[in-house]
């Protein structure tokens, strides 16, 4: 089973982001139902590991926070664009959630994440797009900002790869709760 930890986005954000897609040849735009913020990619695991992950995530405590999608960019930075994304603000509470999830997963026996955490929402996957079209999109959407929403939970997702793109399913919801004594 292929897993990741993420934040499900409400329609006020997914509807807004779905409207910005288009104008780049050879781009595969993500369906609004798949738009989310990844907190931690996990990868392929067996059933026993999945249960340990679920138990470990149950212990994550973090206060609810607000976020909005803001700005656009692409990965890899400085390279040939492969992923087009919307940024996420504010970043600090999201980084805190990421760190707490990371500690819980390492405690459950997973290897530490090797990459720097860059909060984002994947908008499209690109296959050798005309560079000038990507630049036009980035310029046109540079001031993108959605409404702010309250994040009150994070989710454990499963992902199944298919020729038409990944299919996601929420396996478990984890409510965000204030820390004891806060």
Image (cartoon, grey):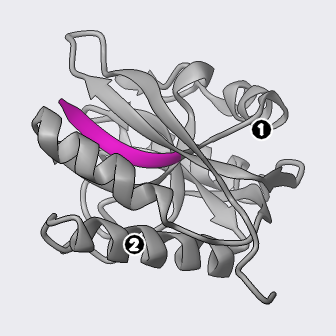
Give percent across and percent down for residue 69.
72, 54
Q: Is residue 39 above or below residue 97?
A: above
- From mark 1 to mark 2, how far is it between C-alphas? 21 Å
Q: Which mark is residue 161?
A: none
Residue plotted at (21% across, 34% down):
2
User: Left of 30 or right of it: where is 115?
Assistant: left
Disc 1 is placed on an element classified as helix
Give percent across and percent down for residue 126.
33, 35
Look at mark 2 in the image and give the residue it sits on. 117
Regarding residue 145, the answer to whether it shows in the image is no
Give percent across and percent down for residue 98.
47, 70
Q: Is residue 107 above or below residue 24?
A: below
Q: Is residue 52 above or below residue 79?
A: above
**Does residue 2 belong to the magenta stretch?**
yes
User: Left of 76 or right of it: where is 32?
Assistant: right
Magenta: main secondary structure: strand
Asked where in the image residue 159 lies, by quadrant, the reply is top left
Count of labels in the image: 2
Asked where in the image residue 57 lies, by quadrant, the reply is bottom left
Quarter of the C terminus within the rendering: bottom right
Disc 2 is placed on an element classified as loop
Q: Compare residues 21 and 53 and report the one nearer the observer.
A: 53
**Does residue 130 belong to the magenta stretch?**
no
- Residue stretch in magenta: 1-6
10 Å crowding of disc 1: few (<14), some (14-19), many (20+): many
Look at mark 1 in the image and give the residue it sits on. 13
Q: Are marks 1 and 2 in contact (CB under 8 Å)?
A: no
Residue plotted at (16% across, 64% down):
110
Quarter of the N terminus within the rendering: top left
Residue plotted at (57% across, 26% down):
23
Give percent across and percent down for residue 92.
65, 81
């Amino acid at each position: 089973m292929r897993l990741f930890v993420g934040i499900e986005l409400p329609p006020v954000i997914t509807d807004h982001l779905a409207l910005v897609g288009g104008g780049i040849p050879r781009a595969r735009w993500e369906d609004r139902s798949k738009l989310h913020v990844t907190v931690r990619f996990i990868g392929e695991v067996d059933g026993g590991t999945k249960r340990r992950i679920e138990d470990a995530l149950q212990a994550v405590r973090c206060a609810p926070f607000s976020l909005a999608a803001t700005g656009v960019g692409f990965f890899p930075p400085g390279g040939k664009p492969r992923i087009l994304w919307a940024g996420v603000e504010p970043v600090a509470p999201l980084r805190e959630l990421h760190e707490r999830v990371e500690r819980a997963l390492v405690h459950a026996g997973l290897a530490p994440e090797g990459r720097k955490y860059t909060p984002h929402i994947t908008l499209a996957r690109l296959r050798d797009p005309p560079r000038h079209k990507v630049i036009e999109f980035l310029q046109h959407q540079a001031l993108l900002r959605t409404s702010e929403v309250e994040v009150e939970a994070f989710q454990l997702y499963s992902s199944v790869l298919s020729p038409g793109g990944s299919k996601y399913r929420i396996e478990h919801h984890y409510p965000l709760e204030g820390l004891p004594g806060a």
